[in-house]
Image: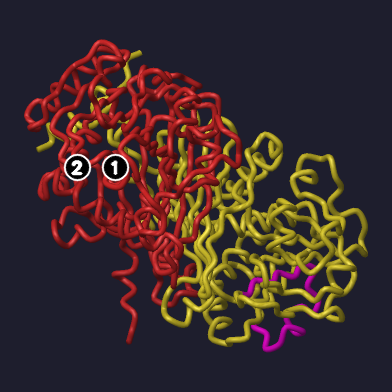
Chain colours: A red, B yellow
């Protein structure tokens, strides 16, 4: 039962490069499908998680957030920024990294890039929600907003729901061209649209994913017919929404964590007591998802710490499967834990 | 003015090994003195910082905390755990790491180990407070609790205040032996004591730094004479204190951030409106520090995010001075920031 201090001093690190290698060695479609399983598993045990709204530091240019959670055995958090103006200056709008640690002794056990991983988990979460909320047999999705998240959404809905057609639109035609190019060999039929109206024509699922940090109206009320599922992922902070309020009033609304969504989601436009359903209750079978053909379902998604936790758990489980990680000398680990100063002295 | 994406993808990382090299290349005493300067600078501009109590995840074994802050240009946070039982199992009680990032675009600019750095900044903060609070000409310090923090405290008080004698005591004589051994060539006169009473005999400064996660009474009221400065750093979470309540009632109490200290510090034993002075007001000259010879001053220190921020700033400024860092591929940085998927595809 002697501890092995030298091993404890090192924490597995998944760089951007290794994250890409993990994804390619398993296959992107397979990763998205497997990640849906991890997220679903954690939504089923939602009640045992330590939940807290994210800790946000707002500035005029954007926001930096810490998103912690714990299942009682493992603790995880993500650092993530959101800076809408970054794109025009050659930076990512969103970058992220995250950590898993042991609750029993506080030692980190995984440090990982999460810019790519957040894109994957956001797409996987959307697809998981749509399993319970989208109309049966949906084959066509509208994608409004063709930024960094667009292709991941399209591929996740293809892999998990069997979508075969995406109708894509962006205010910037170059973004649409980029997405069409990237999806060219995906097996999806990709239709480039020049108006939002054209994009939603005949679509059973409408995904909105735009990045303006302002109240915007990407969808107006008359654009949304009965029976569709709206996957609204772009509105995710105070003052940033995408849907006209009247759409919300006609929809059955599903959210991750109401305390957070009422501040950051589309429903910040509604009264604080407007009825919403928590997605975990649908996944665990205690609340209904889609219950009629004509119903408009809305997943008002802002992203929650438990999804990042699931994604980090997934990555942790791929370390030995793929071998794509390095080890970081992140934790000082003297032979005698009280002798930190002695360790420092001896290193001289 | 074109951005240089490839450089942005990499974040300077200071490992435990490189942190020790930075300290040794500059000299521990010099590092402690310089760090006092950084902390003092940030205490003087305290009001412009974004302050929030740390975000703690408590379990029966300990606590994991995130401590964020920002000065409007730079954002920083620390991950730190506190697990008192770790020591008996061969683990560090406290391990930590931290990050600095740009507020304007959210990109991380430094990732650093902070187990050693927290020990340094805690000692530097104690010494900085004592500059304003300890009796003039103090030469003898009692150190009760001879764990990982002990030697750093002694050396910081030597470097910054000119202490020449430390009287050390721990409930475990082996801890005292360890500290005496490490301080043997420090130039300090080290007196090993077998009772707390012996340790405080003649000391103008009393530092308490024990790690039990419980209400304890390391100092009773009759042990503390007039005119001393008490530097209480061991009590730092709810239910964990070191001083008898009657000592607090006789002392002028100085704290970092009252909202946090009332929950975590010695003053959790007092009424919520008990008068305390914020240390930053003393440092910036708007409140009095020590004002009479007979006064008992108490720095009820629990550690605050701004001190970590100062310490990370200090490390950042040593990167080019010492060259002791590596670069981590932490941030996905595609040529076109919207083309995250294309970057992933092209890596295949």
Q: Is residue A115 visible?
A: no
**Quick check: B282 above or below B243?**
above
At 12% from the left edge and 31% from the top edge, which residue is drawn? B346
Q: Are marks 2 and 1 on the same chain?
A: yes
Return the mark for residue A130: 1
Q: Is residue B10 left or right of residue B227?
A: left
Q: Position of residue A303 (x, y in %)?
A: 41, 42
Based on the picture, tell me whether residue B199 belongs to the magenta stretch.
yes
- Quarter holding residue A41: bottom left
**Residue that carries the numbered disc 2 in the rendered image:** A161
Circle 1 crowding by C-alpha within 10 Å: few under 14, some 14–19, many from 20: many
Cβ atoms under marks 2 and 1 closer than 8 Å: yes
Which mark sits nearer the N-terminus, 2 or 1? 1
**Residue B243 among magenta residues:** no
Q: Is residue B167 visible?
A: yes
Q: Nearer the viewer, residue A3 or B60?
A: B60
Quarter occupied by the C terminus of chain A: bottom left
Label of residue B21 in the image: none
As rendered, which of A154 and A348 lies closer to the eye? A154
- Between B252 and A293, which is closer to the camera in this rendering? A293
Q: Please identify the quarter of the rendering in which residue B323 is found.
A: top left
Residue B66: percent from left, percent from top: 52, 53
Span colored in magenta: B192-210
* Residue B214: % across, % down: 65, 77
Q: Residue at x 40, y 43 (%)?
A: B322
User: Secondary structure under badge 2?
Assistant: helix
Looking at the image, residue B120 sits to the left or right of residue B91; the answer is right
């Amino acid at each position: 039962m002697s501890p092995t201090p030298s091993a404890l001093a090192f924490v597995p690190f998944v760089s951007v490069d290794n994250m890409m290698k993990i994804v390619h060695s398993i296959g992107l479609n397979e990763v998205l499908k497997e990640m849906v399983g991890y997220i679903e598993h954690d939504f089923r045990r939602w009640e045992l998680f330590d939940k807290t709204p994210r800790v946000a530091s707002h500035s005029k240019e954007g926001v930096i957030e810490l998103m912690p959670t714990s299942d009682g055995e493992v603790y995880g958090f993500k650092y993530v920024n959101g800076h809408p103006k970054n794109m025009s200056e050659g930076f990512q709008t969103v970058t992220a990294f995250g950590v898993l640690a042991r609750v029993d002794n506080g030692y980190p056990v995984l440090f990982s890039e999460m810019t790519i991983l957040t894109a994957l988990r956001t797409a996987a979460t959307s697809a998981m929600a749509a399993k319970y909320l989208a109309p049966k047999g949906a084959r066509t999705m509208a994608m409004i907003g063709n930024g960094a998240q667009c292709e991941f959404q399209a591929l996740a809905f293809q892999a998990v729901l069997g979508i075969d057609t995406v109708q894509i639109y962006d205010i910037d035609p170059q973004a649409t061209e980029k997405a069409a190019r990237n999806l060219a060999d995906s097996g999806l039929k990709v239709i480039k649209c020049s108006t939002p109206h054209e994009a939603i024509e005949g679509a059973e699922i409408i995904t909105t994913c735009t990045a303006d940090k302002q109240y915007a109206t990407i969808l107006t009320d008359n654009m949304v017919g009965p029976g569709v599922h709206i996957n609204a992922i772009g509105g995710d902070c105070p003052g940033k929404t995408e849907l006209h309020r009247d759409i919300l009033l006609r929809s059955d609304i599903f959210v991750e964590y109401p305390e957070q969504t009422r501040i950051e989601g589309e429903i910040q436009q509604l009264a604080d007591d407007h009825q919403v359903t928590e997605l975990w209750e649908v996944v665990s079978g205690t609340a209904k998802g889609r219950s009629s053909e004509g119903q408009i379902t809305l997943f008002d998604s802002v992203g929650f710490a438990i999804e990042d936790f699931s994604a980090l758990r997934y990555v942790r489980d791929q370390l030995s499967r793929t071998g794509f990680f390095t080890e970081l000398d992140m934790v000082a680990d003297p032979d005698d834990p009280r002798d930190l100063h002695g360790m420092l002295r001896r290193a001289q």
